[in-house]
Structure formats: C-alpha cells, structure tokens
Image: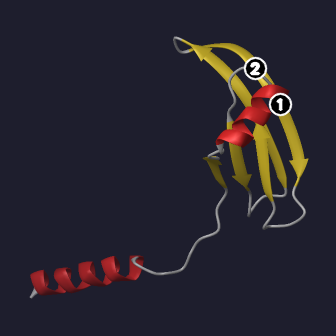
Amino acid sequence: MKFRLFIIVLATIILAACNNQETKSNTIKQKNLSDEERNRLMAAVGGKIFHYEYKAEKEKLLRVWVERYEYGNLVEQAGDIEGIIENEEEKFSFIF
C-alpha cells in the first residue's frame, strides 16, 4: 500500500514539474555574423571580434564587464559598460 502511494505521489510530482509555460529569464548568447558583417567589424574594430546579444527581461539595469584570466589568475579587466533597460523586449549587442 505504501509503495503504491509512493509511486502515485512521485508520478504526480514529475508530471506537475512538466509544463509548457516559458519562464522569463535573462539570456546571453553569441551572435552568428555573416561574412560581410564580420569584415565590416574587423575593419572598424580590428583584432578578434566577440559579438554577444543580451536580453534582460527581469532587470532594469544591465552591466557587462570583461575579465581576462591566465592560468586561473585575473590579469586585467578589459571593459565595463552599463545601460538602463526601458523595454522588456529590448536586446543589447556588445562587441569587443
């Protein structure tokens, strides 16, 4: 009897955890650039290009910084940028 009750409760918990609702979250992802976009940025910036898109749905202030590590030790902080988010659907691009 206890085993059946355990199985029923376990199945209920597993099924309750599965839902189709999307949760709002902050995301960061690397943006894929076309060859033409990459060439234009290389001409303007030079060196290696790292292009990321940020989407912040829960927060009202976005702060991004870049740190460079060598062998697990912080070597330098290469950049720091802040922005105020006025619209939840707004996306930011950061190129360094």
Residue 9: % across, % down: 26, 83
**Outermost residue toward the front in this view:** 36
Instruction: Determine contact: label 1, label 2, CB under 8 Å.
Output: yes
Q: Is residue 17 above or below residue 44?
A: below
Q: Kindly identify the residue that appears in the image at 12 percent across and 86 percent down.
A: 4
For badge 1, the amino acid type reads Asp
Residue 86: % across, % down: 90, 63
User: Which residue is denoted by mark 1 in the rendering?
Assistant: 80
Q: Is residue 71 above or below residue 95?
A: above
Q: Is residue 54 left or right of residue 87?
A: left
Q: Residues within 10 Å of mark 1 (few under 14, many from 20)?
A: few
Helix or strand or loop: what does disc 2 sit on?
strand
Image quadrant assignment for residue 74: top right
Q: Please tell me which residue lies in front, 60 or 87.
A: 87
User: Which residue is denoted by mark 2 in the rendering?
Assistant: 77
Colour logic:
secondary structure
The Cα atoms of the two marked residues, 1 and 2, are separated by: 8 Å
Q: Kindly identify the residue that appears in the image at 86 percent across and 66 percent down.
A: 87
Q: Is residue 2 above or below residue 47?
A: below
